[in-house]
Amino acid sequence: MAKRFGVSEESVEALLKGQRNPELFSERELVALEYAEAVTKASNKVSDELYRKMKDNFEDEEIIEITCLIGIFNYFNRFNNALQVDITK
């Protein structure tokens, strides 16, 4: 799906390997990735520091949209995992 939105193959490969190379991602993208990971792991424990970084890089409306997308994709992942749905390409 990321490729459909213009994310390079190199960036996708880096993410799959858990790499967040600043040469491949902008500061905003790196902060959003850090936020997505934090929300996914423990949404009630997003640090004040990370939230400040989000506020420094995104408008309130963008933070709401990013958080909503994180939640939706977490829902789909959990739903599909519970039902053992195969990933489609």
Image (spheres, rainbow, N blue to C red):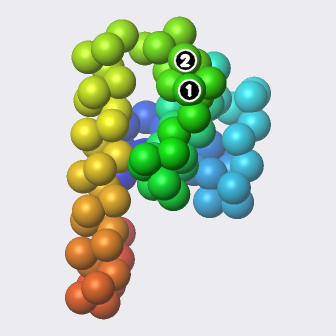
Circle 1: residue type: Asp
Q: Is residue 64 above or below residue 85?
A: above
Secondary structure beneath label 2: helix
- Residue plotted at (51% across, 39% down): 46
Q: Exactly how many numbered labels are in the figure?
A: 2
Q: Is residue 18 above or below residue 22?
A: below
- Residue plotted at (33% across, 37% down): 67
Residue 22 in percent (x, y) is at: 74, 28
- Residue plotted at (31% across, 72% down): 78
Secondary structure beneath label 1: helix
Q: Which residue is mark 1?
A: 48
In this view, the residue farthest toward the bottom is 84
Which mark identifies residue 52?
2
Place residue 69 in its image quadrant: top left
Q: Residues within 10 Å of mark 2 (few under 14, many from 20)?
A: few
Q: Residues within 10 Å of mark 1 (few under 14, many from 20)?
A: few
- Residue plotted at (75% across, 37% down): 21
Place residue 16 in its image quadrant: bottom right
Q: Nearer the viewer, mark 2 or mark 1?
A: 1
* Residue nearer the viewer, 61 or 48: 48
Residue 66 in percent (x, y) is at: 34, 33
Residue 23 in percent (x, y) is at: 75, 27
Place residue 8 in its image quadrant: top right
* Residue nearer the viewer, 33 or 51: 51
In the image, taking residue 45 as reference, residue 58 lies left or right, namely: left
Circle 2: residue type: Arg
For the residues labelled 2 and 1, the Cα–Cα distance comes to: 6 Å
Q: Confirm or deny contact between disc 2 and disc 1 (CB under 8 A).
A: yes
